[in-house]
Amino acid sequence: MDHDIVATHLTKTYKVREVKKSGGIMQFFQTRYSDHTALSDVSFTVDKGEVMGMVGPNGAGKTTTMKMLSGILYPTSGSIQIRGFVPFEKKHAFLRQISFVMGRKNQLIWDLPAIDTFQLNKEIYELDDLSYKRSLGTLLDFLDAHELIHRPVKTLSLGQRMRLELVAALLHNPSILFLDEPTLGLDIVVHSSIVRFLQEYRQEFHPTILLSSHDMRDVEQLTNRLMLVNKGRVVYQGTLHALVRSYGTHKRIRVVREKSYVLPERLKKLVIIDTFPLLELRIKRSELEDTVSLLLSGGKCTDLTVENEQIEKVIEEVLSINSL
Ligand SMILES: Nc1ncnc2c1ncn2[C@@H]1O[C@H](COP(=O)(O)OP(=O)(O)OP(=O)(O)O)[C@@H](O)[C@H]1O
Ligand SMILES: [Mg+2]
């Protein structure tokens, strides 16, 4: 398999300015610089056409990683190869192949209609009229955004703007995408439409994607593999399935019971939801069989389901193990 992205022993240290007040009546300020390591010895690869998820708490180093991969920041040590390019050299041929979308920042010019940014990007990426029109038409169809492009960006809702941000980012048909929290702050409907769009876009164009998100639906629905980052270190790399298998120590049992049902005493401490007729228990995976038979001995249940622990909980567990 071809690796599109190869990051080896990446470390990034920021210089942080500290201003200290000292002295008595004659106060003065001292400025000192200290090092803050945002990323430490991070290595990973992303294959051609693969979608790699990046998950981790605030400040874990996700944006820093993407900034280095896209050439905005230079790593303090370690190396990055993206299709044979070193990002920080910012070669034209490299920049034409990538795109960086940040859910927290806009690329669209605020006071103007989005079509003006699109035309600017057409010039920057030297797209000919035909490719530009074709690309724009396809993206606007995909995102159902034709009617939005002539309105000043500042008058659009976040969801409308995000759809156009994606158009601006994808106009030049990049084959490597860095998507840093692209669904941040979106309502359920817009969120789903963006996820659906990314799935369709992926099926059609097979880009290589590195995607960060705090929303596990994105990771479940869009990625092949994920990388868990905590305090600047990678604490897990692999599939979501393998993560749940190795770290998902608990399961959830949900039953719908009849009025006459009496919960066996021994199970009471495992209950997490008890709103009649629903009853939910969190149990150790290894105790599944015994618990189910004990549970059913309490009386009549009309439904029983067993599910894996929520992914968020599994991730919390991995992070807590690794922050000791
Ligand atoms: N320009 C900077 N100067 C100094 N420190 C920085 C700078 N940018 C980021 N940091 C620090 O580096 C660490 C990693 O930040 P980063 O933005 O990469 O985290 P993140 O995983 O993207 O977090 P979030 O989920 O909140 O977006 C944090 O401790 C942050 O405070
Ligand atoms: Mg970030």
Image (tube, grey):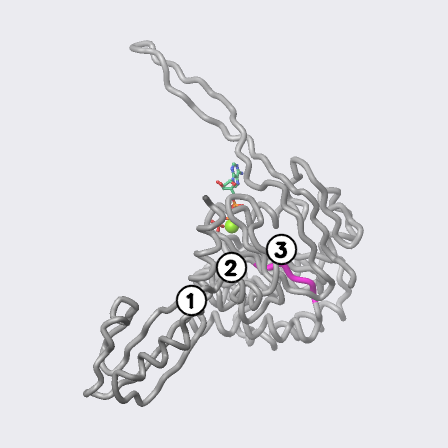
Is residue 208 inside the magenta stretch? yes
Q: Toward which corner of the image does residue 174 lie, by quadrant? A: bottom right
- Residue at 72 percent across and 51 percent down: it is 6
Q: Quadrant of the N terminus?
A: bottom right
What predominant SS class does the magenta segment belong to?
strand
Query: In the rendered structure, which disc, 2 or 3, sits on the residue that comes first in sequence?
Result: 3
Is residue 237 inside the magenta stretch? no
Cα distance in 3D space between marks 2 and 3: 14 Å
Residues in magenta, as a range: 207-211
Decide: marks 3, 1 in contact (CB < 8 A)? Answer: no
Name the residue beneath numbered marker 3: 100
**Above/below status of 30 relative to 316:** above
Helix, strand or loop at mark 2 = loop
**Above/below status of 20 relative to 246:** above
**Above/below status of 275 relative to 30:** below
Name the residue beneath numbered marker 1: 250
Decide: marks 2, 3 in contact (CB < 8 A)? Answer: no
Does the residue tagged 3 have its C-beta within 8 Å of any atom of ligand 2? no
Q: Amino acid at mark 3?
A: Phe
Helix, strand or loop at mark 3 = strand
